[in-house]
Image: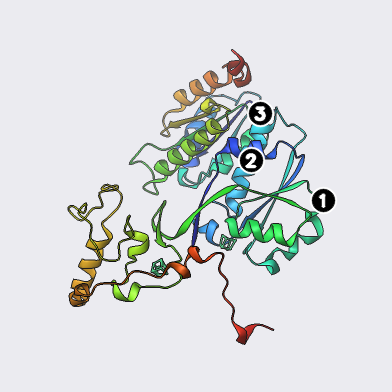
Amino acid sequence: MNKLVIIGCDRSAGEALRSLQETGYCLPEGVIYQPLPCGGSLDVLHVLRALESGAERVLVLSCYADACRSFNGNTWAEKRTAAAQALLTEAGLGQERITYRQVSPNMSADLGAWIHTLINLEPVEAQDRA
Amino acid sequence: MIIAERKPIQEITASLVPYKNVLMVGCNTCVAVCLAGGAKEVSVLSAVLRLALRENQPELTIAERCVERQCEAEMNAELATEIGSYDAVLSTACGVGVQTLAEQFPETVVLPALNTKFMGRPEELGVWSERCAGCGNCVLDRFGGICPVTRCSKNLLNGPCGGSANGRCEVDPVNIPCAWQLIYDRLARLGQLERLTAIEPAKDWSTSRHGGPRRVIRKDVKL
Ligand code: SF4
Ligand code: SF4
């Protein structure tokens, strides 16, 4: 089972991850990175399919506003992430399974910290029961 | 086109409780354009339902199909060989599509996943609005192409009412333009303002829903 699926714009999230890997970092077991050509190509279905296939959490990453090469890819990524969160909430599953962050290529340390935090959170089911 | 909206997920999951093996069938025409029930929405909704019911109905399977126009029996024919193997069909077409499937496959339970709202058009990205109430006797020729039956909140044929202010309708000034302001502006632009001096007679509603379910018959194309 993948604990965490990272779906990110390859120009920002992908660059940050590659920089991190150049320092010797390896993605922890159960974490996979799914690159997108742009945050604007994120689809609600990408997020849902990741959860359906067993991911505990999904982290969506896009560029900062005004840094998107396609102008507003980050806006669409944020909107579609919010739509996926709204669907989960409506279905009674809790939106905390899905996290959205803006990232720039030089934020490799932040990315490593986010991954560490997300994979060390309690499983969502356990949180639901608490 | 027909504009529809997905039902609340809780309502859909409640309707699926008795079933184990469900076929979800979308429609790739009107409801695909209003992003409520095309192939994409079938995939999204079935994924959410599988996630939502994973714990309470783990044995539930949901298969996905999408036909071109669910209101035409010919287009649903491709479902004939398999539809009998499902406990129920969850349709993301409008009410017409749902009823077509139910009529065509009388042994099959067909459930609606959408609420059918109105006949309208895409106004801007993510916004659809009503344009026609299907009154059966179109009066657009007299009103500059703007329908007072549908777009005036009070269906006034001799408007405006006293609640029109600053071009907005008193029922919801933020979202509803006054249809009579629109009619006036349009007729002014067309140089046809004199049309508004004529009193529009009371409408014969027998051509609308008031005359019972309606049919259109074309003898020239009927065998
Ligand atoms: S079933 Fe027919 S009328 Fe209904 S949404 Fe599909 S194409 Fe439109
Ligand atoms: S007058 Fe009747 S047919 Fe014409 S647009 Fe209005 S509701 Fe539809």
Tag 1: amino acid: Ser
Q: Does residue B98 lie above or below A46 as drawn?
A: below
Tag 2: amino acid: Ala
Mark 1 within 8 Å of ligand 1, using the beta carbon? no
Tag 3: amino acid: Asn
**Real-space Cα distance between discs 2 and 3?**
18 Å
- Residue B111: x and y in percent read 66, 48
Residue receiving disc 2: B47
Q: Share a chain, discs 2 and 3?
A: no
Residue in the picture at 61% in, 58% down: B27
Q: Quadrant of residue B151?
A: bottom left
Q: Which mark is residue A2?
A: 3
Q: Residues within 10 Å of mark 1 (few under 14, many from 20)?
A: few
Residue in the picture at 51% in, 31% down: A17
Q: Does residue B152 lie above or below A108 as drawn?
A: below
Q: Are marks 2 and 1 in contact (CB under 8 Å)?
A: no
- Residue B220: x and y in percent read 61, 87
Residue in the picture at 65% in, 26% down: A30
